[in-house]
Amino acid sequence: MRLINRIPSRRSGIMLAALPFIAVMIAYAISSDIRLTANPNDKLLPAPATILDTAIRLFTEADRRSGDILLWQDTWASLQRLLLGVGISAAISLLAGMAIGLLPLVRSGFSSFVAVVSMVPPLALLPILFIVFGLGELSKVVLIIVGITPFMIRDLSQRVLDIPTEQLIKAQTIGGSSLVIALRVTLPQILPRLIANVRLSLGSAWLFLIAAEAVASDVGLGYRIFLVRRYLAMDIILTYVIWITLLAFLIDWALKTLSRRAFPWLEAGL
């Protein structure tokens, strides 16, 4: 049997998926042990037990000054910014993508503009956003929107253009207006793509959020990471990085589950 036709069983698939994670943890444990053996005071690679103790403390112990558990406070602040930015981006991308893909006049006027805007490095605009929108919450949300919206618009508009012309002609033949065609023909076919776009954009959204929080914020996951870096508190930094990764995974899993349940026909056709 050719390799391209060999499909692992469910148990084998789980084991294969776990292997890279196990390999990374083993490699880290060995590297940490080597460094700590050479220098017990080394802070670069804390022992896994140290990271675990730190994680338990961060998740359970309240700050002496404020009385709040800082990790949960940072998590709530960052998730609010992330979900608001991604949600607004998704709404704008859906409307603009459908308009550019369906309407030739809009496509002629805005397609090239969106393509050029998508080439601008979002982080290069960060100082401008802070000047225009201030150092508050708005600038952080706007950075996420500016960073991921142009790419999502381009992808969704292309997906609309890929819809077979026959479907649009048939809808017009039976009397469908532009609005009806957009809502009944186009929208159902690009909603799964919108969810896929959001999933693919989450990594970039986290990057822009952490960058904005590191520059100007007093609460948030990115703010805390850059605050403790000056003390070389790698156990705290690694705990936050692992937590951010877990949050991103859970959001991605939730979106994947939503897509599978809302559009079962999509996977059935694969």
Image: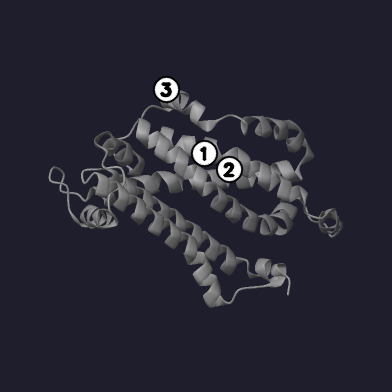
Of circles 2 and 3, the one toward us is 3
**Colouring convention used in this rendered image of the protein:** one colour
Mark sitting on residue 145: 1
Residue 133 position, x and y percent, is 42, 27
Residue under the image location 73 percent in, 50 percent down: 160
Please state if 17 lies on the left or on the right of 222 as rendered.
right
Judge by depth and name the residue closer to the eye, 94 or 159.
159
Amino acid type shown at disc 1: Ile
Q: CA distance from mark 1 to mark 2?
A: 9 Å
Residue under the image location 51 percent in, 65 percent down: 17
Dot 2, how many residues are within 10 Å of its Cα: few (below 14), some (14-19), or many (20+)? some
Amino acid type shown at disc 2: Ile
Q: CA distance from mark 2 to mark 3?
A: 24 Å
Dot 3, how many residues are within 10 Å of its Cα: few (below 14), some (14-19), or many (20+)? few
Residue 15 position, x and y percent, is 50, 71
Quadrant of the image containing the N terminus: bottom right
Please state if 124 lies on the left or on the right of 96 as rendered.
left
Please, which residue is most extreme toward the front here? 38
Mark sitting on residue 131: 3
Which residue bears the numbered disc 2?
Answer: 92
Residue 171 position, x and y percent, is 81, 58
Residue 114 position, x and y percent, is 66, 34
Element type where label 3 sits in the image: helix
Residue under the image location 52 percent in, 32 percent down: 122
Please state if 189 lies on the left or on the right of 234 as rendered.
right
Going from the N terminus, do you reach mark 2 or mark 3 first?
A: 2
Amino acid type shown at disc 3: Ile
